[in-house]
Image: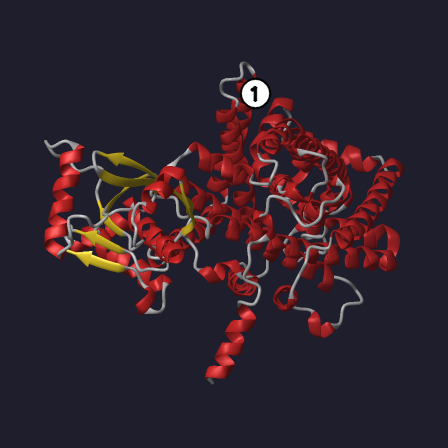
Amino acid sequence: MADIKALCADWLLSDIRLPKGIQTHPEAEHAWWRVMCLTGVDYFSTLGYQPGIAFLAAGLLSPVATLVLVLVTLFAALPLYSRVAGVSPNGQGSIAMLENLFPKWGGKVFVLILLGFATTDFIITMTLSAADAASHFIHNPYAPHFLSSQMLVTLLLLAALAAIFLKGFKEAIGVAVVLVAVYLVLNAIVTIVGLNALLHHPEAFYHWKRAVISQHPSILAIIGLSLILFPKLALGLSGFETGVAVMPLIRGNDLNNRILNTRKLLATAAITMSVFLMATSIITSLLIPAKEFADGGAANSRAMAYLAHQYLGNGFGTVYDVSTILILAFAGASAMAGLLNLIPRYLPRLGMAPEWALASRPLVLVFMGIAILVTLLFHANVDAQGGAYATGVLVLITSAAFAVTLHVWHKGKIRYGFVLITLIFTYTTLLNIWERPEGLKISSLFIVAIIASSLLSRATRSTELRILKVELSPEAVRLLAEDEDQLIRLIAHNPKNQSSMTQTAQLETIGQFVRNRYGLSADECLYFLEVERTDASDFQQTLWIDGCKVGNNRLLYAKSPVVANSVAALLIHLEEHTGKLPHAYFKWKEGNPVANILRFLFLGEGDIAPLVHEVLRRAIADPQHRPVIHVS
């Protein structure tokens, strides 16, 4: 049994490594239009369900509300993410921008909240895409009878997605190019056929116009209602954050060229999607009976597929269904790949994820378990998941708008344009949450889970070594060389100690106490170590040690977010370079032990002596090779 557990653990954790998204230079770079296809499997695939969701949300006003969506896409989201691309050429995106704007713990908590919404976005992308692919499958006349349950087919598609990633998945841009090209060509054919049908039957337009005017006789009322209904169509904005996240994959001679190519990607995708959104909204609203959009109707969540079968026959319709199923399934793969890059990019760096979070297979199992639960809760219904998906998308876009507005605040009148964009997306987000609160509820569950697991992880990892590297200044090296026997003795000294004595007198008094207490001779070389605490919310760093003389006393000093781990790292470094176990001398800290532990977790300080010992114990298995800790 133990061998089986070990084999399972080895298999699950076999690929622990830095995720590709963390690397400054990706393994391969591609032309911007090829990378656009990678993001397009998610962005363009929304054509499979967007027209149907738009009609259910806006009814006969769907084309007008879609026009508002197109205007927001081209004149709000596109310039916004062009700015985001300009300040995050390595794919950090708006989340990193806001992390930098809110320092210390405030920034870390803000990142966790945004990760909750991003997780909602990606998880619902998987479940919604799988559900819509299942809808296309079961409504195809050639589908086998035993696979007539949308829930069953959705779960099978999710299981297949998990199996692919558990075996090992690499983003295949070549496959994405083929899928996107075929899918867009098929949609273009259906769109042209639909527009041609409207040209030959202009009465459809007149019937639609008469119905709209009879319900809303005022043009202002139509515009106003369309503005109110627009947030329900916000799924059509799903591709921008992903477009920035994949920037490291885009070929460029330098960062400026990469930014330029990313802006080409964003603009081309936005214009292409806008044309399709507008055209498909018109033909589906005017050519499909309203009853077919309802739950259980033949056009529910598959309006374009309905037209493909209706006007081009079941043969072409089946080809369209297969293409839609493939691109929707690949959209789920893109979302899973996004999660596997997003979570390791932030949480382990903040110390807020266990080590196994760097391995893809355990994360695949966690994310797939969540996706299955969401599918069961929403009964594999595409329409029901639209609100949750839109909430994740809109919160990320709104946060990006806020970050960009702050970034350009001192750049003249341009800031007023981004203030307006921020207000537009804030309104859209709040109205979407008000009308479809299930999205916020699901996002809140993800946020609570991420924050709780992150804080637990931070606590359990608090006594890791955490220091990536120790570097000594030339002066520190010179001071350490003065100890002839190289058995280094460090005295921990708090730089914040308040005393009426001068610093020299303080150090001499403490040094004499240590000599008397531990029977050290007067000529024994002693070093004082001061660690000034910096931002305690940081987790990993390179420790830089400098040195100086204070009277006759040798002082080493450094800055670090956590004191105990830095002392332990220096002791290990000294042992490695001298071949002798260094000694460290501490005083017990007064106060409540629980309070000291909390101070260590959140402020990076506390009762240093036992914490240094624990860090050393975890870092060095053999007690004979651990530096010696003295406490009085």
Q: Position of residue 213 (x, y in %)?
A: 68, 29
Q: Spot the residue most to the top.
A: 412
> Can residue 125 be seen by looking at this rendering?
no
Q: Which sits in the foreground, 371 or 560?
A: 560
Q: Is residue 610 above or below residue 482?
A: below
Q: Dot 1: few (<14), some (14–19), or many (≥20) neighbours within 10 Å? A: some
Q: Which sits in the foreground, 31 or 525?
A: 525
Q: Which sits in the foreground, 112 or 473?
A: 473
Q: Position of residue 360 (x, y in %)?
A: 56, 61
Q: Residue at x 67, y 35 (%)?
A: 66
Q: Residue at x 63, y 69 (%)?
A: 152
Q: Is residue 142 above or below residue 78?
A: below
Q: Secondary structure at mark 1?
A: helix
Q: Name the kind of residue labelled 1 in the image.
A: Gly
- Residue 621: quarter of image: bottom left
Q: Position of residue 299 (x, y in %)?
A: 72, 52
Instruction: Give the colour scheme of this rendering.
Output: secondary structure
Q: Which residue is mark 1?
A: 417
Is residue 141 rendered to the left or right of residue 389?
A: right
Query: Where's the C terminus, which quadrant?
Result: bottom left
Is residue 209 rendered to the left or right of residue 444?
A: right
Q: Spot the residue most to the right.
A: 200
Q: Position of residue 504 (x, y in %)?
A: 17, 34
> What number of labels is visible?
1
> Can residue 89 be seen by looking at this rendering?
yes
